[in-house]
C-alpha cells in the first residue's frame, strides 16, 4: 500500500488523455485486519462519497465543459482508489472530446468500478445546481465548546471512551476538530465528524478526547472512520451507530466515508458543509 508503485507523494506526469491504467487500487483488507475486522463479516454498512470539483472534458467542438463529479463507492468493495491516481485519471478528460456528459460519466463509472472491484455510482452535477443547493449546517450537537484538557494526539485508544449512567438515549454529536495525517505523505487531512447512536449515553468529554487523538494518527480517511465505528461499538455497546466524516478537499477531491449499523439509519446523502 505504501510501496514504490503508489503515486501519492511522487512526481508524476499529468496525463493528457484518459488512461485507466493510472488508477491505483488500495486493498481495504490490511487496514481492516489491523483493527480486527473480517471483510466477510463486516459489522457495518456504508459508502464512501467522493466529490471531484475539477472535472472537465471537451465537447465535439473543442469547447470545455465542467461539472462536479460524485462517486459513491460501496464499503464492501475489496479496494478503494488511491486519491492522487484518481486525480491523474480525471485530469485526462480535460483534453478529451465526448459526445456529451453522459458519455464521459459512463466512462468514469466503468473505469473506477474496475479499479475498486465493485459497482461505483457516478453522477455529474451541474455547477448551478451545486450553488442552488447551498451549504448544510453540520448535524448534531457540537462537542467543540467543552473546556477539557487533551494531551494525546497520535494514538486513538478505545479505552478513552466512556459511557455514563442513566437510561438509553438517541442523539447526534459532531465535531469540526478532527484531523488525521496521510500514511504516505504525512500531510494533514481535516474533517468534520458526525456520530449518531442509540444506547448508553456516551460521555462527551471522553468522545472529544478520543477524536482529537487522531490528530497525528497516520491512516486513510476510510480506515479512520472504520476504527471509530469499531471502537465505539466495542466500548459503548450502542444498539445502533452511524459515523460519518466530511473531509476537506485535497487536490480538488473530498472524500466522505459513512459507516452504520445495518438498518439503523438512512444514508446521510452528500450534504456540503461550510468548510468544504
Image: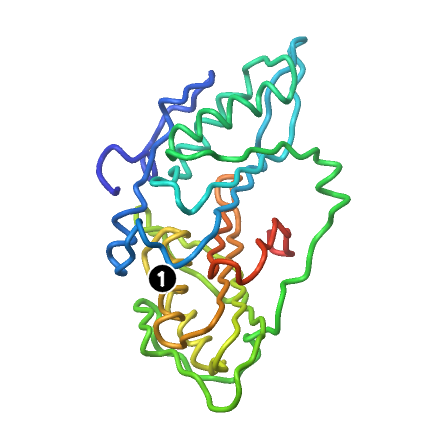
100 or 84: nearer the eye?
Answer: 100
Residue 166, x across and y down, in percent: 51, 91
- Where is 14 relative to 116, above or below? above
226 or 217: nearer the eye?
Answer: 226
Say left or right for 126 vs 47: right
- Seen from this angle, which residue lies furthest left? 3
The quarter holding residue 33 reads bottom left
Residue 175, x across and y down, in percent: 54, 68
Color encoding of the figure: rainbow
- Where is 200 relative to 244, above or below? below
191 or 100: nearer the eye?
Answer: 100
Q: Quadrant of the N terminus?
A: top left
Residue at the spot of label 1: 227
- Seen from this angle, which residue lies furthest top? 61
Residue 109, x across and y down, in percent: 51, 28
Residue 262, x across and y down, in percent: 48, 58
- Seen from this angle, which residue lies furthest bottom? 165
Amino acid at each position: 500500500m505504501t510501496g514504490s508503485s503508489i503515486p501519492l507523494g511522487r512526481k508524476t506526469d499529468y496525463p493528457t488523455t484518459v488512461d485507466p491504467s493510472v488508477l491505483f487500487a488500495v486493498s481495504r483488507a490490511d487496514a481492516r485486519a489491523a483493527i480486527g475486522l473480517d471483510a466477510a463479516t463486516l459489522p457495518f454498512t456504508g459508502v464512501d462519497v467522493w466529490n471531484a470539483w475539477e472535472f472537465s472534458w471537451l465537447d465535439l467542438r473543442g469547447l470545455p465543459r465542467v461539472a462536479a463529479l460524485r462517486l459513491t463507492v460501496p464499503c464492501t468493495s475489496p479496494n478503494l482508489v488511491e486519491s492522487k491516481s484518481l486525480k491523474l485519471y480525471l485530469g485526462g478528460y480535460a483534453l478529451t472530446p465526448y459526445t456529451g456528459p453522459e458519455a464521459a460519466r459512463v466512462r468514469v463509472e466503468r473505469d473506477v468500478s474496475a479499479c475498486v472491484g465493485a459497482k461505483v455510482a457516478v453522477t455529474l452535477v451541474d455547477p448551478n445546481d451545486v450553488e442552488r443547493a447551498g451549504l448544510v449546517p453540520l448535524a448534531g450537537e457540537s462537542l467543540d465548546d467543552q473546556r477539557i484538557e487533551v494531551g494525546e494526539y497520535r494514538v486513538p485508544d478505545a479505552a478513552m471512551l466512556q459511557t455514563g449512567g442513566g437510561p438509553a438515549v438517541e442523539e447526534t454529536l459532531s465535531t469540526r476538530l478532527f484531523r488525521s495525517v496521510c500514511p504516505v505523505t504525512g500531510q494533514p487531512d481535516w474533517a468534520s465528524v458526525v456520530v449518531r447512536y442509540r444506547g448508553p449515553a456516551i460521555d462527551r468529554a471522553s468522545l472529544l478526547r478520543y477524536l482529537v487523538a487522531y490528530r497525528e494518527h497516520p491512516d486513510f480517511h476510510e480506515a479512520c472512520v472504520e476504527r471509530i465505528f469499531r471502537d465505539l461499538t466495542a466500548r459503548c455497546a450502542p444498539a445502533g451507530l452511524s459515523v460519518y466524516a466530511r473531509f476537506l478537499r485535497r487536490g480538488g477531491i473530498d472524500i466522505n466515508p459513512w459507516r452504520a449499523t445495518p438498518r439503523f439509519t438512512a444514508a446521510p446523502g452528500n450534504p456540503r458543509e461550510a468548510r468544504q
